Image (cartoon, grey):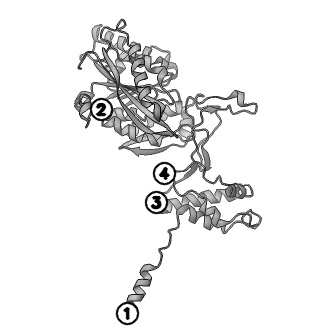
Amino acid sequence: MAANENQNKRQHLKPKQKPILPIEAAITAWASNLPSESALGRGEVDAAELAAQAPKRWTVYEPMVLLPSGSFATSAWTSLKSTLSSSQLYNLWSNILLEISRKSGTSYTHLAVNEGIPLHLREHDDSSTADNDNENILRSPSGLQILYGDFGKYNQRSAADVATESDFEAAFWVSTKQNGIYQTWAPRWTMFSRGNIKEKARVLSFHQPTEPALQHRAMNPSALRDKWAVDMYAGIGYFVFSYAKLGMRVLCWELNPWSVEGLRRGAVANGWSVRVIRGDELTSDVDLGAMIAGDTRIVVFQEDNAMALQRIEQARQKLADHQHGPGSIDEPSSLDVLHVNCGFLPTSEPCWKDAITITQDSPRVWLHLHENVGVADIEKRKTEIGDKLTSMVSREDSPRAPVAIGVEHVELVKTYAPGVWHCVFDSYSCASEGA
């Protein structure tokens, strides 16, 4: 009896074996088959060291596996890779995909390493120098390291070049689901900001406030169906889709044709009607009034948001013509803008004046102004923004211009850099005091 108890104790005290991670298992199996002339075969690097320095985590955007920035970039891995053929590296990446697929029970087909979005892009020609750098206003993911799989051709100079329907069809697209909403994008051409999930969720709950000081936000979901949101930097629909899920209709602007196509595909996946206005339609006499009076949930303009004010004024004029002219529509419609999202970093300030003007005839409105701000400067910036917005309000342009305006809340979304926060400043304005 005592012997059995001692045996049970020894078994209990026996340390548990550390589970072998999928990438580690893939590397171990692959390394055992490398030829003797490789750096590993010559003893210049150690297989255990390579496995230890491999990434331990990954993100799945079906059917792609995305590894974290810096993966396989240590000196040991760099030394080894320089001695390998493309087919040997191919075998490594395919092994990694296979092991991750086995662990998850889902078959993944593409592998890449994530990298930060560069602030500047360089033209893709041999004459490029540092002097040719240009601002990456489209936030193109040019640093993405493609390891395995066909991500589509890359023969355009930039994402802003004309992309055709055949380009879209030939490209590789991925998707994910956040807050019950599908989002779709082409990784080679479009960034995806996973960290915005918190702010998307906040938009979804915006009109169901829990704080007593924000009860003026409360609105019945049925009332939101008659309201509009405007997104000045739509991307692939980050915040557009949150407003659409609230039941609102959305007007949005985006320059990157690949982001526009991702937004369109995402809207379809979520079951929302969407209309994209691009190319010749932007210079033709599109009847925006009829579009607003219709029931399309999301209208996307593929152009600079500097045109947003003009387009909305055209839409309002056309809408008035439809309502009061011959053959007028049966039920009056309006363009009551309740939200304007200005989601560009490091600052969205260039579009604030237009945002104010767009909403001056709305009874009340929230502007959501995205900024990168040092943690010690947040309160100071809040005051500065309130003062700037107040100075932009013109009661001469509109007698219904808001008499009350200010920043009612600052949301800290995520850290952007050490000591720097991605903030959203919620500015609330109303047409009369106490509204």
- Residue bearing the label numbered 4: 60
Q: Which amino acid does label 4 sit on?
A: Val
| Chain-order first, disc 3 or disc 1 | 1
Vertical comparison of 224 with 20: above or below: above
- CA–CA distance in space, label 3 to label 1: 44 Å
Q: In this view, does 105 lie to the left or right of 79?
A: left
Percent x, y for residue 290?
35, 18
Local secondary structure at mark 2: loop
Percent x, y for residue 287?
39, 16
**Callouts 3 and 4 close, C-beta under 8 Å:** yes
Q: Residues within 10 Å of mark 2 (few under 14, many from 20)?
A: some
- CA–CA distance in space, label 1 to label 4: 52 Å
Query: Residue at position x 42%, y 18% from top?
Result: 388
- CA–CA distance in space, label 3 to label 2: 35 Å
Query: Residue at position x 44%, y 45% from top?
Result: 176
- Residue bearing the label numbered 3: 104
- CA–CA distance in space, label 4 to label 2: 29 Å
Q: Which amino acid does label 1 sit on?
A: Ala
Q: What residue type is labelled 3?
A: Ser
- Residue bearing the label numbered 1: 2
Mark drawn on residue 247: 2
| Chain-order first, disc 4 or disc 2 | 4
Mark drawn on residue 98: none
| Chain-order first, disc 3 or disc 4 | 4
Percent x, y for residue 261?
49, 33
Q: In this view, does 230 lie to the left or right of 73?
A: left
Vertical comparison of 131 with 314: above or below: below
For residue 123, which quarter of the picture?
A: top right
Percent x, y for residue 162?
58, 28
| Chain-order first, disc 3 or disc 2 | 3
